[in-house]
Amino acid sequence: MAIDLVELFGGYGVRNAEAFTDADQAVVRIEEIYRDAVTRLRAALRRFAAGEDPGRPDSFYPFVGMMVQARDLALDGRIAYGVLHEPGVYGTTVTRPDIFRDYYRGQLAMLMGNHGQPVVVGISDRPIPLPFGVDEMPEGLSEEEARRLQHLFPMPDLSRTDDAIANGTSDRGADRPGALALFTAERVDYSLARFFHYTGTSPGWVQRFILLTNYQRYVDHFVSWGRRQIEEGNEYDFLVEPGNVTTPNERMTEAAPSGLAPSHLPQMPAYHLTRPDGRGITLVNIGVGPSNARTITDHLAVLRPHCWLMLGHCAGLRRSQQLGDYVLAHGYVRDDHVLDREVPPFVPIPPIAEVQVALQQAVSNVTGLDGLDQKTRMRTGTVASTDNRNWELRYDEFFEKLSQSRTIAVDMESATIATNGFRFRVPYGTLLCVSDKPLHGEIKLRASADSFYRQRVEQHLLVGLEAIRLLREQGPERLHSRKLRSFDEPAFR
């Protein structure tokens, strides 16, 4: 007997449900539901600002779901995502189709192709919070009106917004479908709202390949390199800087420079070199420390990048290392502690083979060194990330730990970035540059630091850019390793 999907999902609070066998049509319906919901929300806010009764806006997130039976399962061990491994009913709320249109289309097409079942799109029972659906609040609201606003309109519900699915700690109840995606719509909107605050750019500019650094000099070289790409009319469309300052490629005849540079840079400024397919490069200067590294990757993760790479400086621990040498991390000592509750310390953080190979090949391509000669400039091994910037002052304590773990370098961000990549299923990699050797008396003094920066920073950035080129050319699908997926994994990448 055929199952009535509309009735089935209606039992989970989904209204106006429709079944689709075409991903493009399903995405069009998602767009319609989201657009209508936001339009009603904004209209209600305008009525409130005019002194009228706004009513309770009927503004709810779109819902996407699928039901699979045992006969529909596709237990192909080669598939890393886009597949469900247990019979049941699955679903998720979705948001911002203007940003995620291609992502939704790809995930739904893969899901339907692997199971031969339609997807259901409808209106969920989760209201869109006012701050997530409205860009600006009306001017001139009194304190009393602002308080009334909190009661008349839906507001973010942090009790329903967490990372339990990604952390593997969610409790699937019988009253709701199983998870189809790592993030609910509210969790995604939470990060999108925070992203501009931290980076000074809109999240829609974020590209699928991301470089993270902890020094402004990398930014300077990236902007100079990006401007050359734009001026030479290469593959990139726009260079976007904080304040959404955009410089278009001259072939973008209908586009003009726009945006306003902020008077002060944000906490972690972002720069985007965009491509039409979204597979350009985003660089974020995360500053120093594991807290910043966690914060920005918490928010970048909802945009589902294909990869993020850490390019930064480190302390070399081996006598044979020289200032300016590269360190390719194969393992991490997590002495940063900022993710211990989400990813317990007993969880190993494995290297991603495709990323490791690309970084090693990029070093060879840029430096011209290969084989044994490459070992004179690059060492592979374990990197320790600490939350103590003055770890050198606890020499005896750290010496034993670093010796036992065979650590070859110390920094403050790499383990955090790799761990959050593991947690959020985002392929990750680390290539550091030795800027000092405190255990051997070579500390970063002004004169030696200036010389180091002149000689190595630009080359280090070029290695990162070359690695991204290699990863892009091999196809991002190869990046999304099965080692990042759990046995009860949501289907969306």
Image: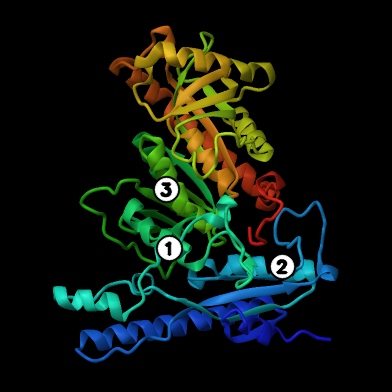
Tag 2: amino acid: Leu
Which of label 1 and label 3 is nearer to you?
Answer: 1
Q: According to the image, label 3 marks what residue?
A: 296
Quarter of the image with the C terminus in it:
bottom right
Q: According to the image, label 2 marks what residue?
A: 111
Residue beneath the point at 51% across and 17% down: 401
Q: According to the image, label 1 marks what residue?
A: 159
- Where residue 325 sits: x, y (%)? 51, 20
Horizontally, is 266 left or right of 293 in the view? Answer: left
- Where residue 384 sits: x, y (%)? 50, 25
Tag 1: amino acid: Ser
Q: As rendered, which of 423 and 78 lies closer to the eye?
A: 423
Q: CA distance from mark 1 to mark 2?
A: 30 Å
Element type at marker 2? Answer: helix
CB of mark 3 within 8 Å of CB of mark 2?
no
Tag 3: amino acid: Ile
- Where residue 437 sits: x, y (%)? 43, 14
Residue beneath the point at 54% across and 42% down: 343
Q: As rendered, which of 155 and 390 lies closer to the eye?
A: 155
Q: CA distance from mark 3 to mark 2?
A: 29 Å
| First-in-chain label (1 vs 3) | 1
Quarter of the image with the N terminus in it:
bottom right
